[in-house]
């Protein structure tokens, strides 16, 4: 006896041992110390003894305890059976290193063949002796490649014997390729077409072809010219599949096929469902199972379909229903630029049908999950893939299909025929090409990062230096910067939070993003309210606890709106929980694929409508402010009016502060959409930088505080210098009594409380001055406004009640903000 190929088993397993006159297979279970395991081995018996006698002899020998002093083996059970297949048949094997003709070889032996391209070297192949003796993979390390690239496949003729070999070569050639050009795709798909048409499609061959198509779908190749060819290949696989019992499924990333044999008299209905994440790369197939929340595609076939089944005959196979699922929507393209495929694609067909499956008396029901929740209940269209459209390249058609019902997440279609089904979403806007989308994404994230940095510096500056936040405009500016800072930071981390795949975390992120967006809009509106009070309602206005009420409104109103949205619809917030960051501008059209508002009504009521109201009010205030400034300039003494550059700076400061650049987002459609999107992304993501430039870097009082507290050496400014300048200004501006009945306005350069005095005195509490006109910030640097006239009898004494109004505080440097 000769023992062949002994294998130790990690745990007790039972195999069917085999015994023949020359070969034996045995399974022995033994115990070594505390180890319990087994072994499998084959035995070649050289004698011509009786088979049963030899089997008993082997059993008795194996059951004898073994002990050599250090190791003891106790056999618990022995199974011995004969090996029926003792050799490997002759086989031709087509590989990338050439065609090898392996001769019939006895089990346990190796065959040798010369390498086709370098005959001085040999390839070997082992005939594995086992329960089912078979060829092992050949050892061709010494052979040189014959098929080095995909074009080399053109020289290989596909025949039934080498169909699987050709598929294996294609699999090897496609390994680690990220993109395939048109010619290579043409060659690969033609070879696959030859394989399915010529070869016998066993489950193993069908699975290998499906794996190749899955690889093609996941590459960055342009598959649109080959959509029909790919669909025909997969259809043929299902039609010609053999070697299964009743049903079979072939599943690969992004694609799945299910085949079921049916008995026409017993057929009532049949359903096909696919469960997957929204990437479509991990499909799971369910037959006759009602759809659940994670079902992304579902088809229900009516009972009337049995009338179209073929009748069994001698030369006709039994009826077969085939389902297909495609989780890569990029394989399909709409002929209309305003429509996009917003679902996965699912199909149903009947093999050897007696007539085309169309004009059914009962509808086929198709339920498909939206890849992106659609907004405003935009038009969704149930369609099927028409192979004859677009000059034979195929395209979507809606004939015979209608929309039964649709929500933001699902659409149910009813069709009177069988084919490939999908749902198109009418986006009604110019599509961005990948280059523009990538650039906008970079601008968005870079702008948000820069704005976050400078908003933080602005908040820190106004918070640390007490003299900069003594008046109302500065305090309102701080709150606006905090709201914008929270909005920018949440947008930057939103995609990262959604990638965790936690629904509760995504809801919290969407809630917070919504809150800070509304808070930013609210504080922009409060900036406008403050300007209106200061410029238009300068006199006879007094609001107790002014800033406290502003804070309650600016932070409380957005919170109430967000809570109300959550109470009305608990599913209003959420996300698709797979990555995909979009440009910031997409927030306005609710097309972001991250944690955000998922309910259409909630989005358009709580975001769009709210923003429209705020910005309409801000535009009105902006126009009123410009008119008021024009009147002030007209009343200014000659030689004190500002230049065009200073006026433009002031207008830009007002525009950014009131958030008027956000209105660009409502016009990002039509031919100019791309240009407006670039402007929208740049202006709004950099809003924090602009606020820093206009209200920190270009403000003299802020620069003084920086020089006093942060600079060293000759750049440092002593604190007393600032106050001595103010004192000198006050001393030089002592009022003179005007003649009775006349008033002469005094004209001075006006600045805020942390720059220079807005009147002839730096402290209104020290003199009986009337309320002053508001400081216009950058405009006032070159535009000198007249101070409010004083009554000639007001030569001293305590301040009047009007001087105690907060209007004086607002006017000190309102438009500096």
Image (cartoon, rainbow, N blue to C red):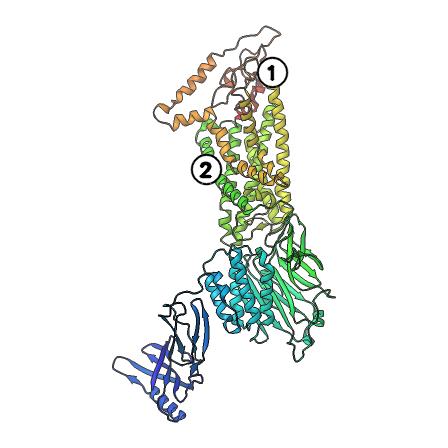
What SS does tag 1 mark?
Answer: loop
Q: Is residue 114 visible?
A: yes
Q: Is residue 510 above or below residue 14?
A: above
* Residue plotted at (53% across, 57% down): 183
Name the quarter where the N terminus is drawn: bottom left
Residue 489: % across, % down:
49, 42
Residue 522: % across, % down:
58, 36
Residue farthest toward the top in the current orientation of the protein: 739
Give residue 615's quadrant in the image.
top right
Residue farthest toward the right in the current orientation of the protein: 361
Q: Is residue 241 above or below residue 339?
A: below
**Local crowd size for mark 2, using a 10 Å CA cut-off: few (<14), some (14–19), many (≥20):** some
Residue labelled with disc 2: 453
Give residue 678's quadrant in the image.
top right
Residue 594: % across, % down:
54, 49
Residue labelled with disc 1: 635
């Amino acid at each position: 006896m000769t023992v062949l190929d002994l294998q130790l088993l990690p745990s007790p397993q039972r195999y069917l041992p085999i015994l023949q006159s020359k070969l034996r297979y045995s399974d022995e279970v033994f115990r070594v110390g505390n180890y319990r395991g087994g072994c499998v081995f084959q035995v070649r018996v050289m004698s011509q003894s009786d088979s049963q006698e030899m089997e008993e002899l082997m059993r008795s020998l194996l059951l004898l305890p073994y002990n050599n002093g250090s190791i003891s083996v106790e056999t618990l059970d022995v199974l011995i059976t004969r090996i029926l297949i003792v050799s490997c048949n002759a086989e031709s094997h087509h590989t990338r290193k050439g065609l090898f003709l392996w001769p019939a070889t006895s089990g346990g032996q190796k065959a040798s063949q010369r390498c086709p391209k370098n005959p001085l070297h040999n390839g070997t192949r082992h005939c594995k002796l086992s329960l089912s003796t078979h060829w092992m993979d050949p050892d061709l390390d010494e052979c040189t490649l014959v098929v080095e690239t995909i074009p080399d496949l053109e020289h290989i003729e596909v025949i039934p014997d080498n169909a699987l070999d050709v598929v294996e070569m294609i699999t090897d050639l496609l390994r680690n390729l990220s993109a395939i050009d048109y010619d290579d795709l043409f060659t690969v798909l033609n070879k696959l077409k030859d394989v399915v048409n010529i070869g016998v499609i066993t489950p193993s061959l069908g699975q290998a072809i499906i794996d190749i198509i899955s690889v093609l779908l996941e590459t960055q190749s342009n598959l649109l010219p080959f959509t029909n060819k790919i669909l025909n290949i997969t259809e043929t696989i299902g039609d010609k599949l053999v070697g299964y019992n009743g049903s079979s499924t072939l599943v690969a990333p992004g694609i799945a096929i299910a085949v079921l044999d049916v008995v026409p008299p017993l057929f009532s209905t049949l359903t096909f469902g696919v469960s997957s994440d929204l990437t479509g790369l991990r499909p799971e197939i369910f037959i006759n199972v009602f759809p659940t929340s994670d079902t992304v595609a579902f088809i229900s076939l009516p009972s009337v379909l049995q009338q179209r089944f073929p009748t069994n005959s001698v030369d006709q196979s039994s009826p077969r229903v085939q389902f297909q699922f495609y989780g890569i929507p990029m394989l399909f393209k709409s002929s209309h630029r305003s429509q996009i495929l917003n679902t996965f694609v699912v199909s149903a067909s009947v093999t050897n049908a007696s007539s085309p499956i169309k004009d059914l008396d009962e509808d086929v029901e198709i339920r498909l999950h939206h890849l992106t929740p659609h907004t405003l209940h935009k038009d969704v269209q149930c369609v099927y893939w028409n192979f004859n459209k677009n000059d034979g390249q195929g395209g979507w058609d809606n004939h015979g299909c209608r929309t039964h019902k649709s929500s933001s997440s699902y659409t149910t279609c009813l069709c009177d025929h069988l084919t490939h089904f999908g749902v198109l979403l009418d986006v009604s806007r110019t599509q961005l090409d990948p280059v523009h989308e990538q650039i906008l994404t970079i601008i968005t994230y870079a702008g948000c990062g820069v704005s976050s940095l400078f908003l933080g510096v602005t908040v820190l500056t106004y918070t640390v230096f007490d003299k900069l936040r003594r008046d109302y405009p500065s305090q309102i500016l701080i709150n606006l910067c905090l709201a914008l800072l929270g909005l920018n930071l949440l947008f930057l981390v939103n995609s990262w939070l959604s990638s965790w795949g936690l629904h509760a975390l995504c809801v919290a992120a969407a809630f917070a993003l919504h809150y800070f967006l509304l808070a930013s809009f609210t504080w922009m509106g409060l900036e406008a309210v403050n300007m209106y009070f200061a410029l238009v309602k300068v006199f006879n206005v007094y609001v107790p606890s002014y800033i406290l009420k502003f804070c309650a409104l600016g932070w409380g109103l957005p919170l109430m709106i967000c809570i109300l949205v959550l109470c009305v619809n608990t599913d209003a917030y959420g996300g698709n929980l797979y990555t995909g960051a979009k440009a910031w501008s997409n927030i306005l059209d609710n097309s972001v694929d991250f944690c955000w508002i998922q309910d259409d009504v909630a989005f358009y009521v709580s975001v769009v409508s709210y923003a429209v109201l705020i910005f309409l009010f801000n535009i009105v205030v902006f126009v009123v402010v410009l008119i008021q400034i024009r009147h002030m300039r007209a009343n200014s003494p000659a030689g004190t009016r500002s230049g065009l550059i200073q006026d433009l700076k002031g207008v830009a400061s007002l525009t950014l502060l009131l958030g008027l650049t956000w209105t660009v987002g409502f016009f990002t459609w039509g031919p100019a959409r791309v240009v407006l999107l670039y402007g929208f992304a740049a202006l709004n993501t950099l809003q924090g930088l602009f606020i820093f430039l206009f209200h920190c870097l270009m403000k003299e009082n802020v620069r003084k505080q920086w020089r006093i507290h942060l600079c060293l050496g000759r750049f440092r400014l002593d604190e007393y210098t600032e106050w001595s300048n103010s004192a000198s200004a006050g001393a030089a501006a002592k009022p003179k009594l005007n003649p009775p009945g006349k008033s002469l306005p005094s004209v001075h350069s006006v600045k805020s409380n942390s720059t220079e005095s807005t009147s002839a005195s730096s402290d209104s509490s020290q003199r009986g001055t009337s309320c002053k006109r508001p400081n216009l910030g950058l405009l006032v640097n070159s535009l000198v406004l007249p101070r409010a006239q004083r009554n000639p009898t007001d030569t001293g004494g305590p301040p009047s009640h009007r001087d105690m109004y907060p209007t004086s505080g607002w006017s000190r440097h309102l438009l500096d903000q």
